[in-house]
Image (cartoon, rainbow, N blue to C red):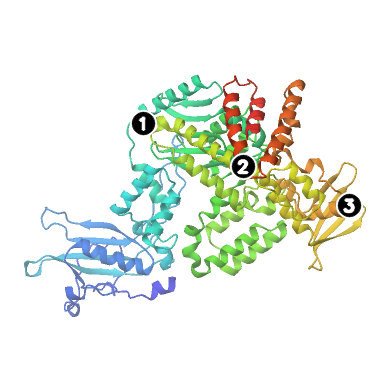
Amino acid sequence: MYKEGSLMMETHDEYSDQRSLSLDDTSSAEESPQDTGRSLESSDDATPYIGQRFVTHDAAYEFYSEFAKRCGFSIRRHRTEGKDGVGKGLTRRYFVCHRAGNTPVKASNESKPQRNRKSSRCGCQAYLRISKNMDLGVPEWRVTGFTNHHNHELLLPNQVRFLPAYRTISETDKNRIFMFAKTGISVQQMMRLMELEKCVEPGYLPFTEKDVRNLLQSFKKVDQEDDSVDLLRMCKNIKDKDPNFRYEYTLDVNERLENIAWSYASSIQSYDIFGDAVVFDTTHRLTSFDMPLGIWVGMNNYGTPCFFACVLLREENTRSFSWALKAFLGFMNGKAPLTILTDQNISLKEAIAIEMPRTKHALCIWFIVAKFPSWFNAVLGERYNEWKAEFYRLYNLEMIEDFELGWGNMVNSFGLHTNRHISSLFALRMHWALPYLRSHFLAGMTTTGPSKSINAFIQRFLSAQTRLAHFVEQAAVAIDFKDQAGEQQIMQQNLQNICLKTGAPMESHAATILTPYAFCKLQEELVLAAHYASFMLEEGYFLVRHHAEMEGGHKVIWIAQGCIITCSCRQFEFSGILCRHALRVLSAMNCFQIPEQYLPIRWRRINTAPTKLLQITGSDHSEQVQALQSMVSTLITESAKSRERLDIATEQISILLSRIKEQPASTQGTTDLIIHEIHR
């Protein structure tokens, strides 16, 4: 493309053969006589030429700008001579390549942080000069100097549109963006909606996500200080009504609200059991107050999202995120998650390393994939879908060596050696690629179903926002609505007749222990286990291979004493569900029940695995709870046998629950949770 730019027409003024042109040239050269015949009618030619005429200097600028866009660069106004209203007024204008000139070196100031941003200017000499002419008393502008030599590469057509000069947001689009912002949807969702409205491919709008964020940032909010005071008052009122509600906040030097975080009693109880893997979503902003919003979310044993806590921050920096993480740990009695999933925020990454040094930090794959259209659609064109399929194949590999070899082949195949997004993804691969994460528990939150469920919940949560003062209260309503919907979904799961597919004793045993959600995951593996053959290499060591394959396979270790089994695929460590390879070996070793430790508490029905919870309660109380759990389990089984039975059970349970809720609740959080789960 650089050569194409060099071969484009180059036209100089009449002195250009005697000396080189410079942007500092102040001569008054005009067009040569042979060019005077080319009049205003020829001003729509594709390339500027000496003698070309324009009615105004703005018309000349627009023409040169369109030419530059076709060539692969943008322009800016450089210098003028004369002044409107003084003497002859403006007499000459220069338009130059956006990379013309050099950025002066600024004196460093240690007390003031400097922006580490490299300038794009490189002393390019491409320019267009126009001069004012008063022939026949009618003012017009003529091209008196032009060169299209560039000392840098010119951009391709699908790249040049990303230059700031060509990124514009029309007034109509601004109005749409402000309307979307009031509904609380994210900038990414705004972009997708506008792409659909305009019928353009992802990544082909005339502006970027950054432009939209800058626009929203400039949209001044009103009554912010009063709103923050109302918010703190609202939190205090909630705390007065519910002592188990927790919140923390900081004020700046001007006594204005800087950061605030909060959590509800039910959320803290849920975290005690399901806080092993947590998503910390910081990709949204509370539009009504223009503050970054962070939401901690997890996945319960029925595969539904559960809210843990929320935070509003003034700034997105390491200091603010460190404060947020400290507040979160304070809410959760100092218990850090095993794994935390976030987006690609460098400041948050640093804060997690400081505040949660033993927690595995991973990147949410759905946050990454959501950016692919804007990152790669325009770059790869027709090969975009082919590349995306190859990315997913690499993402799901088991071995690190296979991933790194495949990544190199992918980069070569699609010519992405210089793509900065590809380079960044590879540098962060240990935080998002499954081959590097399979030894860490992620509760299945990297798969499509749970990720969509969590995202849908977050959107419901965000839809609660109006004014900041009411956000905490309305968010509580949204969470309560989600909890009710979740309880209905859980009841529906429990009422479903579980269909056994293999007839194996392990399957029927697991069906009585695991929730329907977790059992379905295990059942898939049990069904597939029948397609595998196991070979004992030596005592306790097995090779498990698909029956249609002649080589390869997975290594499984079985230690009979202690009933310990591990597989090289590391699925149990990753999801808490035994893999088909381990299940095949258990079957070969005549195991008729899955060992207790491979039916983890976090995937069990609460009423069939109360051991951990009952340790905290009194022994006399535990026997009563255990008996009640048995009755509830029998009730569900018998009620599901007919519609009439189900109607009777539903009616009577509603009456019973109303009576129970009228009684004073236990002060022990764990007992509350047990009763809450029994209600389910």
Q: Name the element at disc 3.
A: loop
Q: Are marks 1 and 3 in contact (CB under 8 Å)?
A: no
Give the residue number, with chain letter if any, for mark 3. 589
Q: Amino acid at mark 1?
A: Gln
Q: Which residue occupies the foreground of this view, 550 or 290?
A: 550
- Residue at 35% across / 66% down in the picture? 69
Disc 3 from disc 2: Cα separation: 45 Å
Q: Name the element at disc 1.
A: helix
Q: Name the element at disc 2.
A: helix
Instruction: Please give left or right for residue 112 compared with residue 657 in the image.
Output: left
Label for residue 644?
Answer: 2
**Picture quadrant where residue 255 is located:** top left
156 versus 279 height, above or below: below
- Residue at 7% across / 70% down in the picture? 136
Q: Are marks 3 and 2 in contact (CB under 8 Å)?
A: no
Residue 111 screen position, x and y as percent: 45, 34
**Picture quadrant where residue 170 is located:** bottom left
Residue mark closest to the camera, 3 vs 2: 2
Residue 496 screen position, x and y as percent: 65, 47
Compare marks 1 and 3 and give the one earlier in the sequence. Answer: 1
- Residue at 19% across / 80% down in the picture? 34
Residue 315 screen position, x and y as percent: 46, 36
Q: Which residue occupies the foreground of this view, 147 or 270?
A: 270
Label for residue 224?
Answer: 1
Q: Residue furthest left?
A: 137
